[in-house]
Image (cartoon, rainbow, N blue to C red):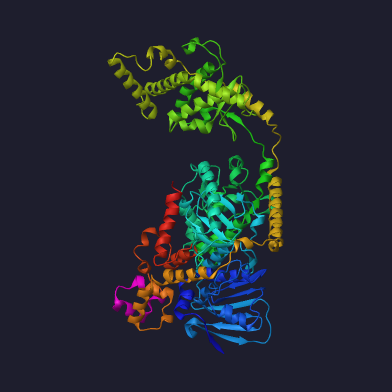
Amino acid sequence: MRYPFELDPQIIHHIIYSQAGSIGKALIELLMNSVDAQASSVLLTVSQEGFTCTDDGHGFASRDDVVNYFGRFGTPHIEGDATYGRFRLGRGQIMAHARTLWRSQSWQMHVDTRLMGYHYDLDDLGEGLSGCQITGEWYEPLSEAELMSAVQEIRDLVRYTPIRVELNGRLITRNPETEKWDAEDEFAWYRVREEGAVSIYNQGVLVRHDPGHMWGVGGLIISKRAIGLNVSRTEILRKTCPVWQGIAKRFGELAAALANQLGHYRKTESRRENAARSLMAGSRSLVTLYRDEEVITLLPGKKHVTLVDFLYKCRRQRPGGYEGCFTIARSEDIPRGELLAGADIVVVMHPITLTRFGCYSNDEFIECLAQIHNNLRESDQTERGAWYMERAFEPAVIDFNTLSNAFVERTQLVREKDALDAETLRAWRSLRWCLVQYARRCTGGKGRWANYTRGGKVFHILLGESTSAEAWTDGESYIAYNIKVVQRLRTDPLRAASYLFSLTEHEIAHEGDSMDCGHDEAFYQRFHDVSIRMAEERQRYMHVFLMKYTTSMEREGKKAAGKAWQERFLVDRVGSGREKRGLPRLTDETKISEEINEVVPDEPVSLIQLINFQLRQQCGAGPEPDWNEVMLEGIVSEIKLSQQKNVEDGGEWLDWVPGGAEGKERIDDREYQEFMEQVNLDMHKQDQEERARMLSVLGINSVLLTEDIFYFLYFETSDDDDLRAAWQEKRWEQEPDDGSELLIHESWTPYMRPEETRWMIERNAAAAGFCGWQAELDYLRWRTEQDHGMLGS
């Protein structure tokens, strides 16, 4: 027997079609219903033809349950009986995409809105089926690309759902309590990242991605309590939800702290991220992206390489018979990773690569790599694609801690002639002489000219390499400066020289060996006193440096130029102006002429060799380990860690029940009435007139004018005659030829990426939480701001 839905048909139409976004979003609503039904696990299968969703929840126990809770939209939940549900509307989304068959206990419901309108068939099967099983057949079968995108979307949307969800035979949900977070409070778990969007999950289900410019950072928020959302669960009620206000306050503090710490480090990398996501989604230009796009970032120096180059480098190390291997440094271990990579021991991947691919663990990255290779295998059967597939593999991951523990950190001195280019060396030699004199004055030396300085310590000024210090000293014979600081003399000599003078004061203030020395109150007092007492001498030696540097260039017949020459010229101009006014010059050139012309001695090679020998002794450097054995040990360790994590993820699901009674407020009649008014205002006003006009012009039933067709006709037709012609020709079903851009609205094109289609933009806009008349355009503008506004700041 057929029963009508007990709600105004026009409201039902909008509940089913207007709130429907992507297929992924619709399937998520079914998963959330399973959570509300107290299910412990859900098996979801999605194919090009349809889907099956099976859970072990309590289902529909009686015919009254079916009539009241399935056949009627808008019945509010009572306090505590649902994690996500509020008004029992979400199941309508799937009805816009597929004809569905629902089975629960002894009841079976059949829904086909295109054939049956707003009715459903209810049958009593007699035999019982525990839980609920929903099968669906898509109204329009999915292409391979659509299927891959939908599967990826579902994985993203339900990453932290509080039940076990298997998608096409693979577990896709995770328990947030077993993961490491940057912060946690009574409202949520928080993770901040340097870039990207802020992904917001309402008790484990993705709501939306806040653009990075809203927070200044990217990150992840998993709420423990229910966040107030709009009816389609695409927007947060930010001003009225107390839970969200607590979350926003805490995440804002974390964002500010990270932005202050890493603001200079962030930069835009939209192209690399776009290429990475296109590789995972199976872009049509997959082989080109695989071969040419630099989607992998390696240490040292954040060098970007292609997947082909990355795998080639990984093959150079084959411990234990593995085809290749690499390790991934954590953010806090980047300096250590630089050292490992610089020693050419192993391929060290920068952690930003995981962010680029949307991964939070090493295992997830390997899964992404396997997915890319599978896409490559299925999408390109040409000779060129086969050539790359023959060489494609997933390298083994080495535990970073195992490598780090086996590697002994070393500090060493280097010769300036070997480490610096000619122009940097010229500036450094001029500055080195000045630093020798300045260090002598800082330690008590007296006198006006370098040749007549009395007292003070005579330090050798040397170059070195270190992963932990910008400068260091033994307190008696030398001060060494990190070559990375000295190399800045080439591009900005004034600032670099000033910084090196400050480092000299810092090392002098240690009054001894600074290698293993901390910074106590006494040190800061000495540093303060030296910097104040020596301010005049510092400025004097800065001028001597500029004169020696520019004079050195002039002696070789080179035209002095750059910031150093500009500073010297400015001093000369000011001095001339003061003389004309009867005032003394800024500096007395006659008093420093000897210092300017003083020959800079060569660096002491024998001393460098002796100090390096002593440094090796202090570090206790033993024989080099057998790195093949160390790497094999690291691979085994990584496998054990991965297995342990999988066991923890699989065994603790039922221990986590998010939210609580305090997070599930009772919905009274007044709130329900406000909700219904919001539905009418938000969903009807914007499209009611245009939809009614189209129905009148075409003379068709409203059921036939689906949301996708409606938007196509709205954007792609110019007048009523064109509207009728487009309806008769079914233009929305036609495959574009070479002129596929004709299906793209003009306002979209400035924001689009290569290879993007209209369908991809519509789907991504819905997945990111954009809805309404100009959802796609708003999404594109938001994405552009995220890529170029926040990351470029």
Based on the displayed image, in which of its 4 quarters is residue 244 positioned?
bottom right
Whole-percent x and y of residue 432?
50, 22
User: Is residue 649 rendered to the left or right of residue 454?
Assistant: right
> Along the line of sight, which residue is nearer the eye, 697 or 5?
5
> Along the line of sight, which residue is nearer the eye, 578 or 374?
578
Does 449 sit above or below residue 707?
above
- Residue lying at the far left in this picture: please name it: 580
Asked if the stretch drawn in magenta spans residue 178, the answer is no
Q: Is residue 779 visible?
A: yes
Whole-percent x and y of residue 256?
51, 45
The residue shown at (40%, 14%) is: 593
Query: Is the stretch drawn in magenta largely helix, strand or loop?
Result: helix
Does 512 sit above or below residue 161?
above
Asked if the stretch drawn in magenta spans residue 715, the answer is yes
The residue shown at (39%, 27%) is: 564
The residues colored magenta run: 714-733
Whole-percent x and y of residue 93?
51, 73
User: Is residue 237 rendered to the left or right of residue 559?
Assistant: right
- Residue lying at the far bottom in this picture: please name it: 1
Looking at the rendered image, the quarter that the N terminus falls into is bottom right
> Along the line of sight, which residue is nearer the eye, 661 or 415?
661
Does 346 sit above or below residue 358?
above
Q: Is residue 308 visible?
A: no
User: Is residue 324 rendered to the left or right of residue 647?
Assistant: left
User: Is residue 73 rendered to the left or right of residue 179?
Assistant: left
> Along the line of sight, which residue is nearer the eye, 97 or 131?
131
Whole-percent x and y of residue 27?
55, 71
